[in-house]
């Protein structure tokens, strides 16, 4: 009898602090850290001969290319994103409202697709150069042609056009939070409108710009498709070819580790900037009144704003539609392989979404519990570790997860007498990788959603006799539905678009739309690639629409 | 000297123009502190913004020190007017230190001049120790004093104060109002304040204009406004308690 | 089909188990043979159907895009695989080295396939050839070419090629090492790199596209793509690219001289093949005249059997003199080739 009451007390204590959830959360967080740990392990297992070869002949050039790419993209997205944000915040002109959300559209186009599109669009026998030649009166590309896109400049251009929205989003939010009186104060102190922008608005927005730039640069690091199509040997490409072509996993891990250093730098930059952002916006807000533009100035403003949208979305999307129609009228059907990849993509994305949202819920919930119990540190650690997965480039993550997967498979295999193929041989590895990578999205959304639920609701429920778990089920979950839906949408689409990790972790004979497109482009058979690309971009529009609507609520 | 000459101010709305200020005139002599006193929405802030150059005039003229600042046809840009402003939310630049804030309008002066002026102003507002602090590290009252120093730094012909004390605690308000008045009369600057708080108005101003729905009902010394209200609304608006307080102040100063 | 099968990642298929169990019943029945292949089904299905019609033996095809070696190894002794078919000499030899093949003797195979294109012990056999040739602008006054010529400075700024690390190219470089030695090959790579009109990237077909686009005048790529391109519907992009180029079969000038580099598609009999006899029958069929005609006409590849009627486009390239070097000699230089490509910074 005494035992039973003791058990009761233990159970009560567990329930009270949700230890089960805490443990689950810690396990999840560990899963996110495992890739990094494993990278070190794998990297240390390589032969010195291999490493010397890589160090001398592969790494320096790849590192230089990567840094040049990061610098170039950083500058381009800063100029485009900040300029666009200022344009729609400070001025008024016909079409401004539409432009506010249209500037987000390039987010729907993954980097490898925009590279794929522009390779064709800007090829000497592509539409752009052909039109230019006709206008100038030349017959053949041998008489007149522009430079080749396959260079570092081409890569910077292509990546800049689809990554600027990260800077645009955060900077615009910042500009909107700036009090009008600051700029007016600057005017009364002798600044012209341009000086006021340069001396007050821009410096104040620096933290927001830094946040946007670091996100854009993390995406740049992650990219494999664009770099490879355009012939730029970046660190990510080096990781991939070292593993696949040079058959050197340890070497790949070593290169991946060096990428981690850059990633860490970017994460630190983003964190630091977010902190600085907070103190900068303590003022009571009076929104900026917009300067109305008329006549030619208004049209110039509109043109300037439309340009990024044209480059980053309209041109590639139009190209994909035209190619799809062309292909369909020629052939009248889609290949079996394409349909298969679509099916696979949907399957994997759905599984990953379910897992990621569930995991995100656990982490966000555990974080809140910890925050209530130990406000100093516990809660934030969860969110931090989750976002590490997002920051890791896909190739790095893939290598990092491989070790634990294989170990797990072997352990399971020896336990049950299976041939040790459970994770690495099936979709499971891929789904788990997606979960790790996109956990930050769902944690972020759910944390925000939880924060909006007043603690008094929970307290009321507890006083009315429900356990913490019961409260979670009956109070929080229903209220969290919008946050969960948003998280699910974002994760689903990101999973659909994912390329680098998928290339490396997919089971045999398994293609998603993205890897299939990649293979087509790599092979130089562009025929059906456009259809896959169009499907991906259309899917990518969904979260952009969602984002645009949330933004508009806080915008105009 | 500030002259508002039959000015009209209006906003454009979907239903047509909404008139905020109708045919308003006033003159403020150099070195005097004027105050527009009225409830929210009576148009006083709009007038201030028009003088600063942020609102266009529908009719009339605004002249300062003989120069025309605004007419219905033409509006001089704010940065070209020698007009300084203190804002309700202080509007201190959060990314700059106190010294940098104060020096902001002195970008045409030499470095040495800037340095000297900043030191002098900090001393005037009694914040010499805050030279390298940042706005978010200061209290509300301190921030407002920095705002004053900053606005005075380029030695404007006119200082505008837009409800500058309304964000402060009640006990701070009057104290700061007296301090500001002392600083301004000492330096001889012309100033125009708008507020809905009568205590501030009577504490700070040489001339008070009681406003109601876009019109000035009376523009006179505080004494005259209180003892000889020219309009029933003015009489209603101005309460007895302030007379008592002012009398006390006058007594304590030996007037 | 090109694969990235030369991969040492330990990715294995759990689904293989289920599939295996299913197939194993079928395979143990008489009159059947199980084929594991990395070639796309639609390319070889007509051949297999014909085989079944003629011999009565049913063919079960398992399409394995990557990791053929890993898969068969995992299946172990229970594997129902009889014939393993793959593309790329390196992949084929990997199967042998991986210990999943068995030697078979067949007079037919030995008669048809030249000695340098099969294993002496009978572990593997070539089924068709994929020559790596010169694409040239059709208006260029050029009739013959050696691989070594590509490094000539007169082609500066006029050469297009795909990534040096791509298996098609590393095979060629390996062959060159076997012909000319590592030092000369390294110099060759450096000179070719200096001649590049644009970065070494893209695919083989991009060489044709870029020649049409005036970016370059010549390039190295696989011959069968030209068959596809020149036989495409008029008005399509592929046809336009194909019509812009002509093909010259380069040869090696280093000893043994006079042959064109080829990569191969080939097959082996699996080590634990339950239907060994049928397996050999299938292989013999695949080198027979009707099958080799299908290889030539449907895939535009070059048949390993002599005297087979070629597609007119392929015919127009002239006679193929295969590089007499044994395939095994080429493959053993593969790793060195890859390292040289890195050393020279060919893809940079």
Image (spheres, rainbow, N blue to C red):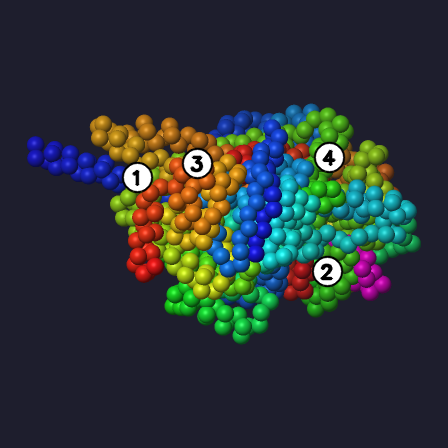
Q: Which portion, as a residue range, is magenta?
A: C147-162
- Please identify, in this view, whether the residue under mark 2 or under mark 1 is nearer the observer: 1
The extreme front residue here reads: B228
Residue, x 38% and y 68% (percent of image)? B129
Q: Earlier in the sequence, mark 1 or mark 4?
A: 1
The reply, left or right, for residue C81 in relation to residue A530 is: left
State how far apart marks 4 and 3 are (Cα).
76 Å
State how far apart marks 1 and 4 are (Cα).
50 Å
Q: Which residue is mark 3?
A: B233
State how far apart marks 3 and 2 are (Cα).
104 Å
Chain letter for the residue marked with disc 3 in the picture:
B
- Please identify, in this view, whether the residue under mark 3 or under mark 2 is nearer the observer: 3
- How crowded pointer 1 is (Cα within 10 Å; few <14, some 14-19, many 20+) is rated as some
Q: Which residue is mark 1?
A: A21
Residue C323 sits in which quadrant? bottom right
State how far apart marks 1 and 3 are (Cα).
67 Å
The extreme bottom residue here reads: B112
Chain letter for the residue marked with disc 4 in the picture:
A
In what element is the residue under mark 4? helix
Q: Which residue is mark 4?
A: A323
Q: Which residue is mark 2?
A: C176
Of A316 and C200, which appears nearest the observer? A316
Q: Is the C-beta separation of discs 2 and 1 under 8 Å?
A: no
Q: Is the C-beta separation of discs 1 and 3 under 8 Å?
A: no
Residue C80 seen in this snapshot: no
Residue, x 45% and y 70% (percent of image)? B119
The reply, left or right, for residue A58 in relation to residue B117 is: right
**Is C151 covered by the magenta stretch?**
yes
């Amino acid at each position: 009898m005494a035992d039973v009451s003791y058990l009761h007390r233990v159970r009560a204590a567990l329930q009270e602090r949700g230890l089960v959830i805490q443990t689950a959360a810690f396990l999840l967080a560990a899963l996110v850290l495992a890739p990094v740990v494993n990278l070190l392990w794998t990297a240390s297992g390589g032969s010195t001969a291999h490493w010397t070869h890589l160090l001398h002949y592969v790494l320096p050039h790849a590192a230089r290319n990567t840094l040049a790419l990061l610098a170039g993209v950083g500058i381009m997205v800063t100029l485009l994103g900040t300029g666009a944000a200022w344009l729609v915040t400070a001025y008024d002109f016909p079409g401004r409202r539409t432009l506010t959300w249209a500037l987000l559209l390039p987010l729907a186009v993954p980097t490898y697709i925009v590279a794929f599109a522009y390779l064709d669009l800007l090829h000497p026998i592509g539409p752009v150069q052909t039109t230019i030649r006709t206008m100038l009166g030349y017959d053949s590309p041998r008489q007149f042609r522009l430079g080749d896109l396959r260079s570092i400049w081409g890569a910077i251009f292509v990546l800049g056009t689809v990554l600027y929205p990260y800077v645009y989003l955060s900077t615009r939010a910042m500009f909107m939070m700036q009090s009008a009186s600051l700029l007016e104060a600057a005017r009364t102190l002798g600044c012209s409108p341009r000086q006021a922008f340069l001396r007050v608005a821009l410096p104040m927005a620096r933290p927001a710009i830094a946040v946007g730039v670091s996100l854009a640069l993390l995406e740049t690091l992650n990219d494999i498709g664009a770099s490879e199509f355009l012939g730029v040997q970046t660190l990510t490409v080096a990781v991939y070819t070292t593993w696949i072509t040079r058959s050197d996993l340890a070497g790949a891990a070593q290169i991946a580790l060096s990428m981690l250093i850059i990633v860490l730098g970017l994460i630190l930059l983003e964190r630091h900037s977010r902190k600085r952002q907070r103190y900068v916006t303590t003022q009571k807000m009076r929104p900026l009144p917009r300067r109305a533009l008329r006549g030619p100035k208004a049209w110039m403003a509109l043109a300037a704003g439309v340009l990024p949208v044209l480059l980053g979305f309209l041109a590639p999307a139009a190209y994909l539609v035209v190619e799809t129609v062309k292909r369909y009228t020629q052939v009248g059907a889609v290949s079996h392989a394409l349909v298969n990849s679509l099916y696979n993509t949907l399957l994997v994305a759905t599984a990953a979404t379910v897992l990621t949202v569930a995991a995100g819920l656990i982490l966000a919930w555990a974080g809140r519990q910890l925050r209530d119990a130990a406000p100093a540190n516990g809660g934030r650690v969860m969110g931090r570790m989750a976002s590490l997965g997002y920051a890791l480039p896909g190739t790095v993550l893939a290598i990092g997860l491989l070790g634990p997967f294989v170990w797990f498979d072997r352990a399971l295999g020896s336990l049950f007498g299976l041939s040790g193929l459970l994770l690495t041989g099936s979709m499971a590895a891929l789904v788990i990788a997606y979960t790790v990578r996109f956990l930050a999205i769902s944690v972020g959304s759910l944390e925000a959603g939880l924060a909006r639920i007043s603690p008094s609701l929970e307290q009321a429920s507890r006083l009315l006799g429900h356990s913490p778990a019961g409260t979670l089920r009956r109070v929080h979950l229903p209220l969290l539905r919008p946050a969960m839906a948003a998280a699910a949408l974002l994760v689903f689409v990101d999973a659909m678009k994912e390329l680098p990790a998928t290339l490396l972790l997919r089971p045999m004979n398994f293609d998603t739309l993205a890897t299939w497109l990649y293979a087509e482009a790599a092979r130089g058979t562009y025929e059906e690639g456009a259809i896959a690309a169009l499907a991906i971009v259309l899917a990518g529009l969904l979260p952009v629409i969602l984002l645009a609507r949330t933004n508009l609520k806080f915008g105009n | 000297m500030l002259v508002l000459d039959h000015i009209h101010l209006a906003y454009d709305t979907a239903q047509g123009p909404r008139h905020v200020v109708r045919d308003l005139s006033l003159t403020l002599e150099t070195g005097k502190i004027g105050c527009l006193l009225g409830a929210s929405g009576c148009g006083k802030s709009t007038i201030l913004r028009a003088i600063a150059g942020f609102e266009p005039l529908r009719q009339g003229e605004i002249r300062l020190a003989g120069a025309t600042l605004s007419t219905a046809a033409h509006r001089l840009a704010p940065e070209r007017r020698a007009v300084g402003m203190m804002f309700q939310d202080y509007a201190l630049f959060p990314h700059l230190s106190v010294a940098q804030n104060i020096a902001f309008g002195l970008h045409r002066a030499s470095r040495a001049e800037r340095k000297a002026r900043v030191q002098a102003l900090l001393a005037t507002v009694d914040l010499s120790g805050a030279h390298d602090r940042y706005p978010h590290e200061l209290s509300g009252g301190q921030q407002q004093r920095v705002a004053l120093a900053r606005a005075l730094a380029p030695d404007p012909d006119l200082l505008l104060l837009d409800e500058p004390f309304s964000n402060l605690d009640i006990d701070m308000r009057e104290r700061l109002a007296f301090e500001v008045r002392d600083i301004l009369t000492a330096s001889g600057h012309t100033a125009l304040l708008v507020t809905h708080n009568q205590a501030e108005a009577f504490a700070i101003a040489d001339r008070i204009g009681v406003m109601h729905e876009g019109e000035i009902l009376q523009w006179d010394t505080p004494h005259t406004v209180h003892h000889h209200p020219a309009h029933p609304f003015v009489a209603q608006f101005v309460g007895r308690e302030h007379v008592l307080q002012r009398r006390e102040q006058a007594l304590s100063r030996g007037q | 089909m090109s694969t990235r099968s030369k991969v040492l990642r330990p990715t294995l298929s759990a689904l293989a188990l289920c599939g295996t169990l299913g197939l194993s019943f079928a395979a143990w029945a008489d009159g059947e043979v199980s084929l594991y292949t990395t070639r796309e089904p639609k390319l070889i299905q007509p051949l297999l159907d014909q085989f079944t019609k003629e011999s009565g033996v049913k063919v079960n095809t398992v399409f394995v895009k990557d990791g053929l070696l890993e898969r068969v190894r995992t299946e172990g002794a229970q594997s129902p695989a009889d014939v393993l078919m793959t593309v790329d000499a390196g992949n084929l030899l990997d199967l042998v080295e991986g210990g999943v093949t068995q030697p078979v003797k067949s007079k037919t195979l030995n008669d048809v396939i030249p000695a340098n294109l099969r294993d002496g012990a009978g572990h593997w056999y070539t089924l068709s050839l994929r020559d790596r040739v010169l694409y040239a602008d059709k208006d260029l006054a050029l009739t013959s070419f050696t691989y070594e010529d590509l490094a000539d400075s007169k082609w500066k700024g006029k050469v297009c090629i795909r990534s040096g690390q791509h298996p098609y190219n590393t095979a060629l470089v390996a062959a060159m090492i076997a012909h000319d030695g590592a030092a000369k090959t390294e110099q060759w790579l450096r000179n070719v790199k200096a001649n590049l009109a644009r970065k070494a990237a893209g695919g083989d077909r991009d060489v044709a596209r870029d020649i049409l686009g005036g970016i370059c005048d010549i390039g190295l790529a696989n011959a069968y793509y030209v068959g596809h391109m020149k036989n495409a519907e008029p008005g399509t992009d592929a046809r336009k690219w194909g019509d812009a180029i002509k093909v010259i079969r380069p040869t090696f000038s280093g000893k043994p001289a006079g042959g064109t580099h080829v990569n191969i598609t080939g097959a082996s009999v699996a080590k634990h093949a339950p239907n060994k006899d049928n397996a050999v029958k299938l292989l013999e069929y695949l080198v027979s005249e009707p099958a080799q005609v299908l290889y030539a006409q449907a895939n535009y590849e070059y048949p390993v059997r002599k005297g087979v009627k070629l597609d007119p486009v392929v015919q127009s390239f002239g006679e193929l003199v295969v590089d007499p070097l044994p395939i095994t000699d080429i493959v053993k230089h593969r790793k060195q080739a890859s390292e040289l490509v890195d050393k020279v910074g060919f893809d940079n």
